[in-house]
Amino acid sequence: MTRIYNFAAGPAVLPTSVIKKVQSELLSFQNSGMSVLEISHRSSLYTDMVQEAEADLRTLMDIPANYDVLFQQGGATLQFTAVPLNLANKANCIGLIDSGHWSQRAAEEAKLVGKEINIIASGANSDYTQLPQEIALNQKYDYVHITTNNTIEGTMYCQLPDVENNLLVGDMSSNILGQKYNIRDFGLVYAGAQKNIGPAGLTVVIVRHDLIGQVSGLPSMLDYAKQVTKKSALNTPPVFAIYTAGLVFKWLLELGGVDAIQKLNEQKAQVLYDYLDNSKLFKAAVAKKTDRSTTNIPFVTGDAALDARFVAQATENGLLNLKGHRLVGGMRASLYNAFPLEGVQELVRFMEQFEQTVG
Ligand code: PMP
C-alpha cells in the first residue's frame, strides 16, 4: 500500500506513525477488549485519555494554569458564534482585523448574533496578498479578532499585531502547534482540529478563566462556563477525534515540540518559496516575504488552463489536492506539521519537469 503526498488544506495529512498506532489498538483500547470507537465518555478509559491529551497540549503550548482548555465540536465556524456570545457583552463591539475570507466569516457570524463589527485593519487593498498594515483603534472593543494564518490567501502572522491594551482573540485553525505564539498574549484562541491537530470533529478552545461566566442564558453548548464545569463533556464528546489528537500531541512532543516543528515547517516552506521565487512559470501568490505562511502556500502560473493541466498531471504523479481554493484559483500546497520534507522536494522536482515541458 503506497501513501501519496497529500497537500490538502484540511482535513489534512496525519503522521503515519499515529495512523499505525490507531490501527494497532483499534480493536482493543488499552487492553479493555473494546475499541476506542465504542468506549463510554463516562468511563475512566475516556477521562484518563482526555486528561492526558489536555496535559500534553498544555505542555506543547505552554498554557498557563489560569487558562481553560476545551475540546468542543462544531468546528472553528461554531466558535465564530460562541466567542462573541461569551466575550462581546460590554461594548457589544468587536474590532476585526480583516485578513481574508475566514476573518470575514468570523465577522458575518458575530453580526448574526447582534454584535457590531468594526474593521480596524484590512488587507483588501492588496487583495489580501499582504497582511493588513495600519491598525486604527478608535473605540472600546470587547476584543480584537485576528486570524493568525490565512489558509486560503497564504499569509501568516509571525509577530502579533500591536492592539494596545485590547483583548486579543485568535483563530489559529491553520497554524496552531506549527508556529510558536505566547498564549498569554491572547484572551482566547480557537482552532478546528483537522489541520495540525487530528481528524475533523474536534475544535480546541483555550480561554483565560476570568473572561468566562459573565453572561447568563446562553445556549448550554455555547456557554464556555458550563463547558468548563462539565469538562467538555456536557454532551457526548467526539471521543475518537480527541483520542487521535492525543496521539498527535505525543508525536509532536517526541519530535521536540513546537520549536522543533516550526523550524522544520520553515525549512519545508523555504524549499517551495525558493523554487517559486526563481521560476519563470510559477509565482507565489504572496510576494512579501515577511507575510508568507509556512503552512499554506498558494501559487499560480497566471493561466487558468495551464494551472488545471498542472494539477491534473501532479495528481497522476501522486501529488494530490494541489488545486487552489475556489475563491482564489491557481494552486495551493498545504504543508502542515505532518507533511514530510521529502514531499515538498518531490513537488519541486515535478514542477521543474513541468516547467521544462511547457517552456
Ligand atoms: N478558520 C480558518 C482559518 C480555517 O482555515 C477554517 C477552515 N478551513 C475555518 C476557520 C473553518 O473551520 P471549520 O471547518 O472547522 O468550521
Image: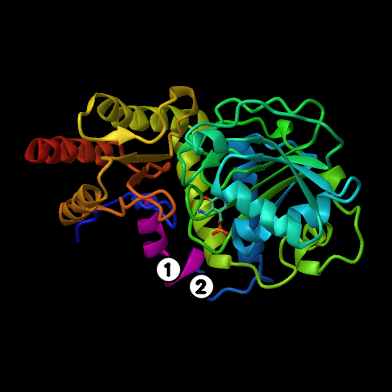
Q: Nearer the viewer, residue 188 or 112?
A: 112
Q: Is residue 10 left or right of residue 240?
A: left
Q: Nearer the viewer, residue 252 or 115?
A: 115
Where residue 36 sits: x, y (%)? 51, 69
Write the start and end of the magenta stretch as one range.
Answer: 17-30
The dominant secondary structure in magenta is helix
- Residue 52 visible from this viewpoint: no
Residue 251 found in image quarter: top left
Q: How many numbered discs?
A: 2
Q: Tell me if mark 1 has few (under 14), some (14-19) or many (20+) residues whose alpha carbon lies within 10 angstroms of its own.
A: some
Asked if the residues shown at circle 2 and circle 1 are in contact, with their CB atoms under 8 angstroms apart, the answer is yes
Q: CA distance from mark 2 to mark 1?
A: 8 Å
**Residue shown at the point (47%, 35%) measured from the top left:** 129
Question: Is tag 2's residue or tag 1's residue first in the polypeptide sequence?
Answer: 1
- Residue 256 visible from this viewpoint: yes
Q: Residue furthest front?
A: 125
Q: Nearer the viewer, residue 236 or 90?
A: 90
Q: Nearer the viewer, residue 209 or 250?
A: 209
- Residue that numbered label 2 is attached to: 37
- Residue that numbered label 1 is attached to: 26
**Residue shown at the point (28%, 30%) measured from the top left:** 276
